[in-house]
Image (spheres, rainbow, N blue to C red):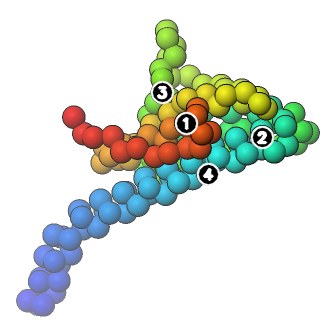
Amino acid sequence: MVVVAIIGLITAISYPSAAAGIDSARLVSACGSVSTFLNSAVNRVERRRQPIELIVSPKENRLTMYSAEPGFTRELPMPDGIVIEAVLPAAQGADESDRRLILMPGATVPGIGIQLANRRGARRIVRLDPMTGFPRVESVSKE
């Protein structure tokens, strides 16, 4: 009985840190997925010379890309526990509706950021760099 009580106590003490670790891993994985998704959109524009419409939907918690090529659609839903908190820079006078961007061949990539958050309040921003066209992930400090 004492052994079972000790095991229960150890489990109760270690559960919050294990759950926090899982939430942190989900956030890191989601940031990697968003970076890959944005990179594939930019690559498709430059290599296939096709315009791409990129839709960031905080309400539906997903990213979608469309092309003029018939039947081409890609979606990236966020995993459980991860939300799209904001699209940066914030559009003036807009609410949290879908943000639509058009990526054109030969044009500059828009300098946007997609802020992701987990249940524990950790936040990261995936920014699309207009100079290089590559996404990068930034940690957001808790204030």
Q: Quadrant of residue 70?
A: top right
Of mark 1 and mark 4, the one earlier in the sequence is: 4
SS at mark 3?
Answer: strand
Residue that label 1 marks: 129
Q: Nearer the viewer, mark 1 or mark 4?
A: 1
Disc 2 to disc 3, how far (Cα)? 23 Å
Give the residue number, with chain letter if any, for mark 3. 88
Q: Position of residue 114 (x, y in %)?
A: 50, 36
- Say if residue 79 shows up in the picture: no
Figure check: 13 above or below 81? below
Q: Residue 101, position in %: x, y? A: 66, 26
Q: Quote the CA–CA distance across marks 1 and 4.
A: 14 Å
Q: Which residue is mark 2?
A: 46
Residue position marked by numbered label 4 in the rendering: 36
Tag 3: amino acid: Leu
Residue 88 is situated, as x and y percent measured from the top left of the image, at 48, 27
Name, please, the residue furthest toward the right.
Answer: 70
Q: Which residue type carries mark 2?
A: Glu
How many neighbours does mark 4 have within 10 angstroms: few (below 14), some (14-19), or many (20 or more)?
A: some
Q: What label does residue 59 carry, if any?
A: none
What residue is at 21 percent from the left and 75 percent from the top? Answer: 11
